[in-house]
Image (cartoon, coloured by chain):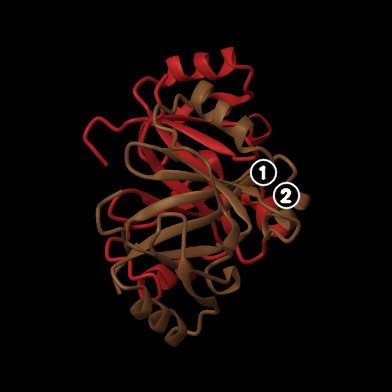
Chain colours: A brown, B red
Amino acid sequence: MKLGRLNHVGVATPSIEASIAFYRDVMGATVIRAPFDLPAQGVKVCFVDTPNSQIELIEPLGEASPIHGFLAKNPAGGQHHLCYEVPDIHEAKAWFEAKGCKVLGEPRIGAHGTPIFFVHPKDMGGVLTEIMETPREGH
Amino acid sequence: MKLGRLNHVGVATPSIEASIAFYRDVMGATVIRAPFDLPAQGVKVCFVDTPNSQIELIEPLGEASPIHGFLAKNPAGGQHHLCYEVPDIHEAKAWFEAKGCKVLGEPRIGAHGTPIFFVHPKDMGGVLTEIMETPREGH
């Protein structure tokens, strides 16, 4: 497998609304996508485009959101995960499993509408890593 | 100011040597630059290219390295900072200061040979942020 595009950096936030204002007014972002709910992942999501990648703002959605624990430790928010693209999600899952990495659950549809899975940070140099099938129609 | 390229994601590691093996053998990186010391920052550095950005592996260099504290909390390593490019480092410093963000020290030469500064995570949504003048001859 070859290392793919860094599709996005996942950044947890207690408030997507406040983070949008920050990325627009302080960071100078000019392309901020409409936020939307991703109930299957327990998050509300908003993509901020950089010229070469994206920041994925993630806010807890619902009581069981996996982001609550992160925000309890990091109340202001912070870097949550890195997401790389792969051409085929099932080949990628088999690859990481063969390398002894803990894949968290089966591939499911992610924020870009293509299948994704996460790999446990303990096997990834401490980095929670999302693997995402490249969208067919670009980014 | 307009949001610039995500030049790299800084990833702290207790061992650049082990991380190089991980990025090569597990992540499938094909372009891994030669590691080098950056004594002024108290780090050893190694860039791993993705098709659109870079991972900057950083290992502590010397007793006073600012990475020791991070690794004490995250022994396996993990995401340390995000680095964005700007066209002019002094304009960028004035911009962030005018926005009330805490710029950490004066601009100094960073790992890519151009001036950089860091902005305190408390003013950046919990993300330690490096601002870097775009290299003149590409990346």
Instruction: Determine the residue located farthest toward the bottom in the rendered image.
Output: A98
Kind of residue indicated by mark 1 = Gly
* Image quadrant in which the N terminus of chain A is located: bottom left
- From the top left corner, tell me how far across and down residue A89 is, in percent: 37, 73
Q: Which mark is residue A133?
A: none
Vertical order, B25 against B37 (above or below): below
Amino acid type assigned to the residue bearing label 2 in the image: Leu
Q: Which mark is residue A77?
A: 1
Residue occupying image coordinates x 68% and y 55%: A67
Residue at x 74%, y 57% (from the top left corner)? A69
**Label 1 CA crowd tier, 10 Å (few <14, some 14–19, many 20+):** many
| Residue at which label 2 appears | A71
Q: Quick check: marks 2 and 1 in contact, CB under 8 Å?
A: yes
SS assignment at label 1: loop
The crowding category of the residue bearing disc 2, from other C-alpha atoms within 10 Å (few below 14, some 14 to 19, many at least 20), is some
Q: Say above or below: A109 vs B41.
A: below
Label 2 resides on the chain identified as A
